[in-house]
């Protein structure tokens, strides 16, 4: 059986990095992308290859349609087909709506919504029959906390795009789902938060802890497995009971 190729957008850090490390252990061929920090991506790739896994890196700004198309075209040219696409790439800007500049708002939307749109279009033409697509949202689409307004709106748009796109995939034998994590111990989550705030978030779950990136990656692993062929067009909330 040939090795299946998986593209992980934003695979150099956080949840994307955890996905790359977990899936490499399942003998997938990993293509992990970075937007700006090549050094971080190289460290993840080296970690995988040291464990006898198969990984390579590529620069890709998902908000740039040419970057995305080039990534997918080059992957197909090199590996023949793409089994799965996992889009963990995105940005978060935490401010009240009244404090947002229009440039900040446009940057957020361009990355999180337009970026997802670009990935979906490219994946439609390149993911093989039987393949999988996974996009990422956030539990803030339901909790709508202050300072998360534009970010929550961008992730709600991702959920809607995915549920609609699942219908457009009719006849291609490809599943697509959205994972919506709760508070997860990543650099993005910790940024700008006090220890007290972090502990408050941890205590909101009945399991009394933050999620770990590996908790999310294990759900991704399931969705790529043969056991998940009937899971499609869902928003899967992975949050330890946070909501």
Image (cartoon, helix red, strand yellow):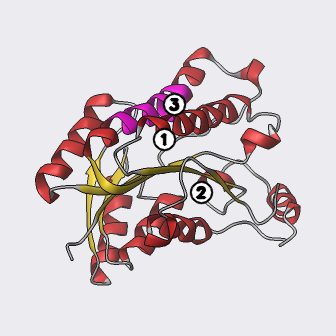
Q: Residue at x 60, y 31 (%)?
A: 157
User: Picture coordinates of residue 6 (x, y %)?
Assistant: 33, 60
Q: Characterize the local packing of mark 3: few (<14), some (14-19) or many (20 or more) Cα atoms within 10 angstroms.
A: many
- Residue at the spot of label 2: 187
Residue 166 is labelled as: 1
Label pair 1/2, CB-CB below 8 angstroms: no
Farthest residue, direction top: 102
Q: Residue at x 69, y 66 (%)?
A: 211
Q: Earlier in the sequence, mark 2 or mark 3?
A: 3
Relative placement, left or right, of 197 versus 84 is right
Q: Quadrant of residue 30?
A: bottom left
Where does the magenta region start and end?
109-121
At label 2, counting other C-alpha atoms closer than 10 Å, the crowd grade (few under 14, some 14-19, many 20 or more) is few
Residue wearing tag 3:
113
Q: Nearer the viewer, residue 97 or 233?
A: 233
Q: In the displayed image of the protein, which residue is found farthest to the bottom?
A: 51
For this rendering, which residue is in front, 129 or 24?
129
User: Which quadrant holds the N terminus?
Assistant: bottom left
Alpha carbon separation for disc pair 2 and 3? 21 Å
Residue 134, visible in the rendered structure? no
* Residue 221 higher or lower than 189, as above or below: below
Q: Residue furthest left?
A: 77
- The residues tagged by marks 1 and 3 sit, at their Cα atoms, a distance apart of 17 Å
Q: Secondary structure at mark 2?
A: helix
* Mark with earlier residue (1, 2): 1
Give me the residue at 21% from left, 39% from top: 70
């Amino acid at each position: 059986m040939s090795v299946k190729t998986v593209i992980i957008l934003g695979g150099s850090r956080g949840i994307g990095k955890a996905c790359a490390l977990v899936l490499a252990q399942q003998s997938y061929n990993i293509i992990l992308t970075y937007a700006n920090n090549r050094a971080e991506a190289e460290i993840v790739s080296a970690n995988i290859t040291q464990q006898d896994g198969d990984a390579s890196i590529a620069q890709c700004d998902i908000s740039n349609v040419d970057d995305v198309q080039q990534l997918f075209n080059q992957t197909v040219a090199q590996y023949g087909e793409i089994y799965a696409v996992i889009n963990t790439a995105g940005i978060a800007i935490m401010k009240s709506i009244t404090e947002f500049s229009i440039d900040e708002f446009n940057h957020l939307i361009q990355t999180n919504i337009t970026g997802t749109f670009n990935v979906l279009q490219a994946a439609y033409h390149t993911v093989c029959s039987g393949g999988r697509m996974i996009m990422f949202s956030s539990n803030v689409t339901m909790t709508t906390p202050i300072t998360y307004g534009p970010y929550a709106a961008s992730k709600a748009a991702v959920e809607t795009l995915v549920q609609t796109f699942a219908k457009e995939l009719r006849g291609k034998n490809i599943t697509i789902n959205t994972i919506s994590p709760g508070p997860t111990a990543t650099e993005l989550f910790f940024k700008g938060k006090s220890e007290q705030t972090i502990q408050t978030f941890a205590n909101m779950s009945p399991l009394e802890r933050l999620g770990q990136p590996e908790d999310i990656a294990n759900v991704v692993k399931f969705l790529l497995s043969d056991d998940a062929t009937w899971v499609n067009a869902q928003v899967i909330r992975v949050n330890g009971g946070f909501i």
